[in-house]
Image (cartoon, rainbow, N blue to C red):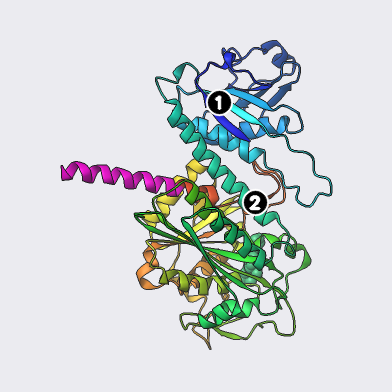
């Protein structure tokens, strides 16, 4: 899908089809040419309402407000209505006067996210029509937005939405296809596409050399060898270093603490943290953010076999911490433990891990929301603010000293599960805390994306299956941090003069 902005008035733009946004039942708005037909269809113009008038080649969508997420949803519904049509070009007017950039960016994001189809495994996938969407800036173009800055805003939205769709592709791919090795290949391809990105991939020997005993144990029973993946985007004069760590379980059977079959299905999605950090890195590079960005992935399978690690084993992590295994299904935290130790060696200014870590997080906040944990309230606050603009949902879960005690072990430094069934999302994060060096504790956030990463029914503009959870949230956050940084620069310049 190509998306262009134009200074022309909507009437002057030639296109096969038109999308019309109806704001809050305002059927008398100048854009609405088919009021009678809409009334016949009982179309009122409220949120989530869509009407396709094929003879007029118009799709009407209702919104209750011009909030970004209302617009994203409306556009995803509109593009869905004509997904199977042969229309090659679509035009849309914009309510520029009310909210200049946000609303054209939301239009672009809604269309790209809504247009996503995963048909990799269909024997005869439907032909995809290459379409262009033209956004009219209308009579406000000169006054509010320059054409160039409007196109720049749209291009940014396109990068962010495409990065989200890329994460969906990775997660939706099945375990025998998206193996650790294949995931490493995805990373290498990302590095090949951009001179500012470097990649390192290490196998079992590397894990041994790095003393990553926990990661090695989890991966041991699988036919597919583990892969440690490290991507670095390093622009010139980078100001800060963001290090992202992703849980890359290409399959989680539970190991010897085997999952019941109804819980095992969908566990291809246990690599969603990895998919997110790889897509974030690629997105950040395309957005040319002025930060060094690292994506570290621990990729492996949690399987059963004669050589599988066992409940009762004691593992030694990279930082020397001994871990009593009491449940092999709590494997993500073991892989992340070693990856977090490695991540601290990169001397991050910000350290964020992303993982489908616990079912408990889904119970706590619901399946659409990411759980955000960490020691630094200011950091969490900033991320949550950016999350709101991205359209993703997130909620913070607070640490406390009582839950911290529940992961003590009698015979090792720490146990891989808690001694209470409650607060499982928090106790998992408190486990990870043991692998973040003191110096980086205040720079660290843990995002549990177990709920939103994969939902087996459509929700909003997300199709059933993978949603690319975490990608938009973090890319919006990086853009916001960039804005704050450049403001600081201006301030410094003025002071200097
Ligand atoms: N990958 C799962 C967590 C998960 C559950 C992700 C549901 C997505 C949807 C994780 O490895 C796991 O199995 N966690 C256990 C931890 C328990 C054994 C302490 C869980 O949540 O049940
Ligand atoms: Zn598990
Ligand atoms: Zn898992």
Mark 1 surroundings within 10 Å by alpha-carbon count, few (fewer than 14), some (14 through 19), many (20 or more): many
- Any mark on residue 117, and which? none
> Does the magenta stretch mainly form a helix, a strand or a loop?
helix
Q: Is residue 73 visible?
A: no
Q: Is residue 492 above or below residue 100?
A: below
Residue 229 shown left or right of residue 224 in the figure: left
Verify CB contact (< 8 Å) between mark 2 and mark 1. Answer: no
Residue 425, given in percent of the width and then of the height, sits at 55, 64
Does residue 219 lie above or below 411 as drawn? above
Q: Quadrant of the C terminus?
A: top left
Using the image as rendered, state which of residue 466 and residue 222 is in the foreground.
222
Q: Is residue 481 magenta?
A: yes
Which of labels 2 and 1 is toward the front?
A: 1
Q: Quadrant of the N terminus?
A: top right
Query: Foreground: 119 or 441?
Result: 119
| Mark found first going from the N terminus, 2 or 1 | 1
Q: Is mark 2 within 8 Å of ligand 1?
A: no
Which percent across, then down, holds residue 270?
65, 62
Which portion, as a residue range, is magenta?
Answer: 477-497
Residue lying furthest left: 497
- Indicate the position of residue 219 as horizontal and vertical percent values: 65, 76
Q: Is there any visible trace of residue 332 in the rendered image?
A: yes
**In the rendered view, would you say 302 is above or below 393?**
below
| 5 within the magenta span | no
Between 489 and 469, the one nearer to me in the picture? 489
- On residue 168, which mark appears? 2
User: Residue tagged by mark 1?
Assistant: 135
Q: Say what secondary structure mark 2 lies in.
A: helix
- Tell me the SS state at disc 1: strand
Which image quarter has ligand 1? bottom right
Locate residue 92: give its quadrant. Answer: top right
Q: How many numbered marks, from 0 up?
A: 2
């Amino acid at each position: 899908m190509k998306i262009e902005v134009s200074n022309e008035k909507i009437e002057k733009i030639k296109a096969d089809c038109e999308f019309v946004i109806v704001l809050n039942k305002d059927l008398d708005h100048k854009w609405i040419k088919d009021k009678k037909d809409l009334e016949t269809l009982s179309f009122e113009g409220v949120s989530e309402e869509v009407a396709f008038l094929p003879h007029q080649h118009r799709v009407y969508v209702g919104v209750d407000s011009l909030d970004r997420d209302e617009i994203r949803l409306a556009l995803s519904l509109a593009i869905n209505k004509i997904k199977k049509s042969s229309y090659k070009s679509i035009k849309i007017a914009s309510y520029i006067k009310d909210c200049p950039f946000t609303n054209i960016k939301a239009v672009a994001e809604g269309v790209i996210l809504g247009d996503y189809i995963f048909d990799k495994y269909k024997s005869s996938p439907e032909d995809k029509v290459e379409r262009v969407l033209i956004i009219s800036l209308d009579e406000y173009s000169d006054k509010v937005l320059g054409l160039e800055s409007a196109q720049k805003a749209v291009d940014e939205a396109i990068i962010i939405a495409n990065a989200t769709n890329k994460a969906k592709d990775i997660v939706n791919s099945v375990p025998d296809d998206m193996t650790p090795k294949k995931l490493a290949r995805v990373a290498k391809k990302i590095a090949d596409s951009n001179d500012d990105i470097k990649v390192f991939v290490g196998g079992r020997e590397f894990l041994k050399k790095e003393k990553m005993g926990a990661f090695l144990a989890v991966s041991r029973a699988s036919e597919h060898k583990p892969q440690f993946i490290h991507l670095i985007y390093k622009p010139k004069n980078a100001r800060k270093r963001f290090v992202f760590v992703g849980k890359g379980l290409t399959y989680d059977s539970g190991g010897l603490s085997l999952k019941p079959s109804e819980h095992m299905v969908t566990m291809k999605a246990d690599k969603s943290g990895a998919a997110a950090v790889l897509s974030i890195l690629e997105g950040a590079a395309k957005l040319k953010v002025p930060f060094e960005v690292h994506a570290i992935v621990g990729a492996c399978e949690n399987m059963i076999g004669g050589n599988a690690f066992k409940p009762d084993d004691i593992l030694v992590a990279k930082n020397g911490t001994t871990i009593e295994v009491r449940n092999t299904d709590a494997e993500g935290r073991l892989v992340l433990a070693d990856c977090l130790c490695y991540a601290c060696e990169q001397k991050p200014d910000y350290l964020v891990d992303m993982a489908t870590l616990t079912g408990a997080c889904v119970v706590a906040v619901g399946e659409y929301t990411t759980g955000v944990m960490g020691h630094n309230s200011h950091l969490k606050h900033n991320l949550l603010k950016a999350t709101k603009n991205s359209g993703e949902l997130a909620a913070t879960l607070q640490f406390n000293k009582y839950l911290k005690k529940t992961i003590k072990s009698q015979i090792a430094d720490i146990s891989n599960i808690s001694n209470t069934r409650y607060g499982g999302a928090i106790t998992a994060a408190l486990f990870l805390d043991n692998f973040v060096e003191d110096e980086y504790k205040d720079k660290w956030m843990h995002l549990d994306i177990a709920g939103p990463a994969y939902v087996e029914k459509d929700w909003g503009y997300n199709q059933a299956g993978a949603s690319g959870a975490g990608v938009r949230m973090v890319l919006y956050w990086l853009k916001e941090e960039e804005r704050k940084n450049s403001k600081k620069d201006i301030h410094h310049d003025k002071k200097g003069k």
